[in-house]
């Protein structure tokens, strides 16, 4: 993010409000609507903040909150409708004009190939941000590993999320849609999917993503934290 990083207290407050908003509704479908609304209100450029909020819940000792959030992701995976953030693809020639309205196709994950940008779920977002050239400064390996481990631990609280997310990643790894993922990124996604599907610990899943490549960034890349 370009703006000032929120304080730990602000992150905890934001995570608490997110969980409270989900807990206020018993319908899983409506909870998914609430989660997607939060992402939309944060805005495309602040999707990393959403991932940080997930991390706060993951690191908490509130098992109920973790299950609630993970189950909502399970609903999203069943519907193939993950709350996503957009990154420019490795082959993009330009970004949408920020001074004008953004076309619907630029925001929909169902229009792969129709735009240089696509919506990515949190695991895919972290992987692409770490590995590919996008509009963001590349995410450092240590931050990538930590954020991914916390995310996997959170999602493991839901049987649906634990089962369906690796399946989605494995399918993505086999997909060579133009402008979506580089070969190296597909290899990373496949490694994450395999380790996760095999029941490895969150730390081992995150490490498996890094073990697939000894040189994640070409020389001269600048990297940053989440």
Image (spheres, rainbow, N blue to C red):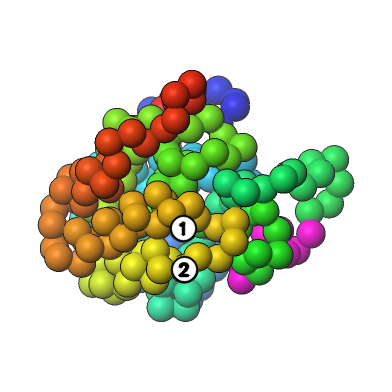
Q: Is residue 106 magenta?
A: yes
Q: Is residue 86 above or below residue 56?
A: below
- Where residue 144 appears, as percent x and y from the top left, is 34, 38
Q: Residue at x 50, y 55 (%)?
A: 181
Which of the two discs, 1 and 2, labels the residue nearer the N terminus?
1
Residue 224: quadrant of the picture: top left
Residue matched to label 1:
121
Q: Residue at x 55, y 58 (%)?
A: 180
In this rendered view, identify the residue nearer to me: 81 or 133. 133
**In the picture, which quadrant includes the N terminus?**
top right
Q: Is residue 4 magenta?
A: no
In this rendered view, identify the residue nearer to me: 27 or 55. 55
- Where residue 171 appears, as percent x and y from the top left, is 39, 71
Q: Residue at x 55, y 65 (%)?
A: 177
> In what element is the residue under mark 1?
loop
Residue matched to label 2:
175
> In what element is the residue under mark 2?
loop
């Amino acid at each position: 993010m370009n703006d000032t990083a929120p304080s730990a207290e602000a992150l905890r407050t934001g995570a608490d409000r997110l969980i409270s908003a989900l807990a206020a509704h018993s319908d899983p479908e409506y909870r998914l609507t609430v989660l997607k609304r939060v992402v939309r209100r944060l805005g495309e450029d602040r999707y990393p903040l959403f991932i940080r909020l997930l991390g706060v819940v993951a690191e908490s000792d509130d098992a109920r909150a973790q299950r609630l959030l993970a189950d909502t992701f399970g609903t999203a995976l069943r519907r193939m409708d993950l709350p996503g953030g957009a990154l420019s693809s490795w082959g993009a020639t330009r970004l949408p004009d920020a001074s004008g309205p953004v076309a619907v196709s630029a925001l929909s994950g169902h229009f792969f190939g129709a735009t240089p940008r696509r919506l990515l779920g949190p695991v895919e977002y972290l992987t692409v941000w770490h590995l590919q050239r996008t509009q963001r400064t590349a995410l450092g390996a240590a931050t990538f590993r930590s954020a991914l481990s916390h995310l996997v631990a959170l999602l493991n609280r839901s049987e649906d999320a634990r089962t369906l997310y690796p399946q989605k990643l494995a399918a993505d790894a086999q997909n060579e849609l133009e402008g979506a993922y580089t070969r190296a990124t597909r290899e990373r996604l496949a490694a994450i999917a395999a380790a996760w599907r095999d029941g490895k610990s969150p730390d081992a899943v995150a490490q498996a993503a890094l073990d697939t490549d000894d040189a994640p960034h070409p020389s001269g890349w600048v990297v940053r934290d989440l």
